[in-house]
Image (cartoon, rainbow, N blue to C red):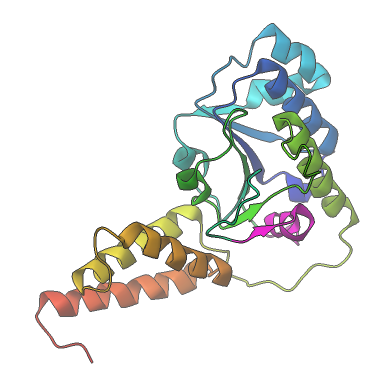
Amino acid sequence: MPPWSLQQLRLVLVEPAGPLNVGSVARVMKNMGLTQLVLVNPRCHLQDPLARQMAVHGGDILDQARVVDSLAAALTGCQRVVATTGRQQPQAQRLEWPEAVLPWLLPTDPEEQLRSALVFGPEDRGLSNEELLHAQRWIRIPASDTYPSLNLAQAVAVCSYLLHRQAVTASSPASRSTDPPADWQQRQGFCQDLEAILLKIGYLYPHTAASRMAKLRQLLDRSDPNSQELAMLRGVLRQINWALARGQDLP
């Protein structure tokens, strides 16, 4: 029986190309108690004989996998999202070690309805800058500088093991809010509302809005607001927009 804390976690593969890799991912998921596999625009078929051969007893993971046409669709309903990257150069957002981040994806109580996702990029390019911005936190598996790039299935195996170890060894639940964390759609909606207001008042300019909003998203993600908190912030934005529409002076 898989640990209860892993059953709400989605493992998302963006544009996987190799049936051997997809099958190997299904096998290691079965080994480590992960059950939800989502593929974004896969470039191979789930029923490819090579995928089935590599999955061995993880064939049911392939049978139950969901295929979607966008990363946004794969993350619908998720409250916490972690993206993986093999890049070593400085990033707009701090790269963290898997051990420090992956426990954050798991609920700490059987009653907690925490929906989360761990995202892996295509074998040939990894996740793009735009795709990375769908996640609140980024991880990189530390490896030798001589050859730091891991195979997709190997990266999944490392992360799956760490998640399983966390799930079966967690001894005391951490303190948590009684209100669930805001999900990805709520965060996106808030950021869209915020960008519209900031453009309207002249804080943002169209040609620099994307880079500024990326930094504001990082600030929001670090604070990890719950649903009620984010609803309150969106209410503030609506009131500001109402005042602007009426031509009222803002203090």
Instruction: Please say if 71 is above or below 193.
Output: above
Q: Along the line of sight, which residue is nearer the eye, 62 or 191?
A: 191
Q: Position of residue 200 (x, y in %)?
A: 19, 69
The question of residue 212 being in magenta is answered with no
**Which image quadrant for residue 210?**
bottom left
**Residue 89 relative to residue 130: left or right:** right
**Is residue 107 among what the camera can see?**
no
**Which image quadrant for residue 156?**
top right
Q: Along the line of sight, which residue is nearer the eye, 47 or 110?
A: 47
Q: Along the line of sight, which residue is nearer the eye, 84 or 66?
A: 84
Q: Quadrant of the C terminus?
A: bottom left
Instruction: Please say if 244 is above or below 97.
Output: below
Q: Position of residue 133 (x, y in %)?
A: 49, 52
Instruction: Please say if 244 is above or below 207.
Output: below
Please give the name of the residue rendered at 54% of the width and 28% of the height, measured from the top-left corner: 15
**Residue 208 relative to residue 8: left or right:** left
Please give the name of the residue rendered at 20% of the width and 87% of the height, measured from the top-left corner: 250
Q: Position of residue 129 (x, y in %)?
A: 48, 46
Q: Which residue appears farthest toward the top when viewing the image?
A: 49
Question: For the magenta stretch, what is the residue range?
Answer: 94-112
**Is residue 91 among what the camera can see?**
yes
Please give the name of the residue rendered at 51% of the width and 57% of the height, measured from the top-left corner: 183
Q: Quadrant of the N terminus?
A: top right
Q: Along the line of sight, which residue is nearer the eye, 131 or 62?
A: 131
Q: Position of residue 194 (x, y in %)?
A: 33, 67
Q: Which residue appears farthest toward the front when viewing the image?
A: 146
Please give the name of the residue rendered at 72% of the width and 10% of the height, measured from the top-left corner: 50
